[in-house]
Amino acid sequence: MESKIKEAIDKSLEELKSIQEKVDEFIDDIPDDTHQIKTTAKNTLAQINTLLNNAVKQAGDQADEAQLQAHLGVKEAQEKIEASKVVVDDYLARAGDESKKLLDEVQLKQHLAMMEARDFWDERGSKMAEEFKESATNFQSVAEKAAADLQSAFAQFSDIFTNADKNKKG
């Protein structure tokens, strides 16, 4: 980029020199009785040329300064990125460690719950199965008794209605 800026400045200076030569030739072609005008014009053009040369040189210096500042800015940004990379890597490592600890804790709790469930089943499972069988047997007995009682009640109702019909006919 620096070479392009310097190249543009050099081309501008060459163009300025070419213009200066053409203006000098034009002024030289003016009749001699206008000597004072020629001198004033040449002096004015020389001053303009000096001012333009200074401006171009200053612009080149400022371009160099801008390029230096940009380079320093890039370096500073790289340093900050490198510094933040350490912090980010550390944070990610700690987050990974915390996640691993949490996952390990969840797996441990799952394992403990499974062991507790097995212990419970080993201790209470057979008793519960026995109680369930008793309960099922008791329930069946109660249901059979209820069905027998219901059948007996229906038989009594049937006898009542049968006797009532016999009494009405007789």
Image (cartoon, helix red, strand yellow):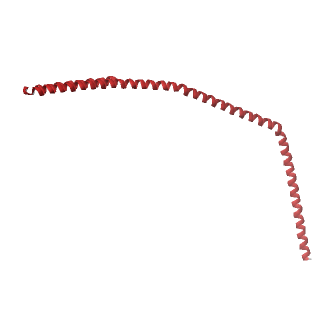
Q: Position of residue 111 (x, y in %)?
A: 73, 33
How many marks overall? Answer: 0
Q: Position of residue 135 (x, y in %)?
A: 85, 48
Q: Position of residue 35 (x, y in %)?
A: 10, 26
Left or right of 141 on screen, residue 54: left
Kindly indicate the quadrant of the structure image that contains residue 86: top right
Residue located 21% across and 25% down the image: 47
Residue located 83% across and 39% down the image: 124
Q: Quadrant of the N terminus?
A: top left
Q: Position of residue 48 (x, y in %)?
A: 21, 27
Q: Quadrant of the C terminus?
A: bottom right
Residue located 43% across and 25% down the image: 74
Kindly indicate the quadrant of the structure image that contains residue 159: bottom right
Kindly indicate the quadrant of the structure image that contains residue 129: top right
Work out whether 73 lies above or below 154.
above
Please name whichever residue, 14 or 111, is drawn nearer the observer in this view of the structure.
14
Work out whether 125 lies above or below 27.
below
Please name whichever residue, 112 or 35, is drawn nearer the observer in this view of the structure.
35
Left or right of 123 on screen, residue 109: left
Please name whichever residue, 48 or 137, is drawn nearer the observer in this view of the structure.
48
Please name whichever residue, 44 or 85, is drawn nearer the observer in this view of the structure.
44
Left or right of 114 on screen, residue 44: left
